[in-house]
Image (cartoon, rainbow, N blue to C red):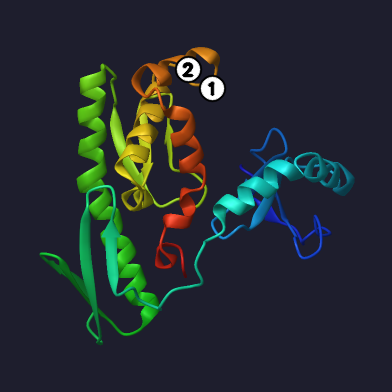
Amino acid sequence: MNTPNTQLSLFEARSAGESFAVRVSARARRLTARVHVGGRVEIVVPPGVGPKTVRDFVHRFSPWIDRKVAAMQCAAEPAAPVPKEVEFRTTDERFSVDWQISGARGLRVDGGRIRVYAADAARARALLRAWLARAAAARLAPQLQELAARLGFEVARVVIRRQRTRWGSCSTRGTVSLNCSLLFLRPEVVRYLFVHELSHTKHMNHSPRFWRLVETHEPDFRSLDRELLAAWRAVPDWVFRA
């Protein structure tokens, strides 16, 4: 039986006002640092690892953590409870949002207008997130499949997720997972992410051969990779707001 993950209390701050959470995971084989949207730092550790080892790890990787925190922190203050507009930069689409407080619950898209019926803002955001996932599946999955066929890659299937720390991933069985928030990014950056994940269908690592393959299909991958790292700032507040 799998041992459930355990959330421990916060260790001492990395520096003034910068704390980190520690989560013990039975599946973890080594210490890893994760930085979530908004800049929250989580250290995942295998069972039996002591506080001193964790502190030493955080101290050693603080420069990387600081860069990642800066990239994951939203540039703007929290927005309105329900957005007035949704813009998909990837497909150059813009939708106005009309939230109507109602006991009935639902969402309807009429051209460039989204009508949301919900009793409160939290339910309205949940409806928008569900619609975002459907919109991403309808837009991103066909784009990825078309690019794969054109470049000579094989993809078993495409899965759409709403993740806080990953833009995409590729399994050993050829399943490519895409973050629905890619819709908020420039099409050039999204294409690079596609190339990156498709290249993993050939090389399940980040070896020199992997990066050579990426460069074959996207010569400007270095600058696009840096832009992708900082692109969490482009994700609207409502996508992850509870």
Type of amino acid at the residue the image marks with label 1: His
Residue 173 in picture, x, y percent from top left = 38, 24
Q: Quadrant of residue 236?
A: bottom left
CA–CA distance in space, label 2 to label 1: 6 Å
Q: Is residue 166 visible?
A: yes
Could you tell me if the residues under marks 2 and 1 are in contact, i.e. CB atoms within 8 Å? yes
Q: Which residue is mark 2?
A: 210
Helix or strand or loop: what does disc 2 sit on?
Answer: helix
| Rendered view: 240 above or below 170 | below
Could you tell me which residue is drawn at 33 percent across and 46 percent down? 186
68 left or right of 135 in image? right
Residue 100 in picture, x, y percent from top left = 23, 84
Q: Which residue is mark 1?
A: 206
Helix or strand or loop: what does disc 1 sit on?
Answer: loop
Front residue of 171/139: it is 139
Residue 82 in picture, x, y percent from top left = 35, 76
**Other-residue count near label 1 (Cα within 10 Å), few / some / many at <14 / 14–19 / ≥20:** few
Labelled disc at residue 24? none
Type of amino acid at the residue the image marks with label 2: Phe
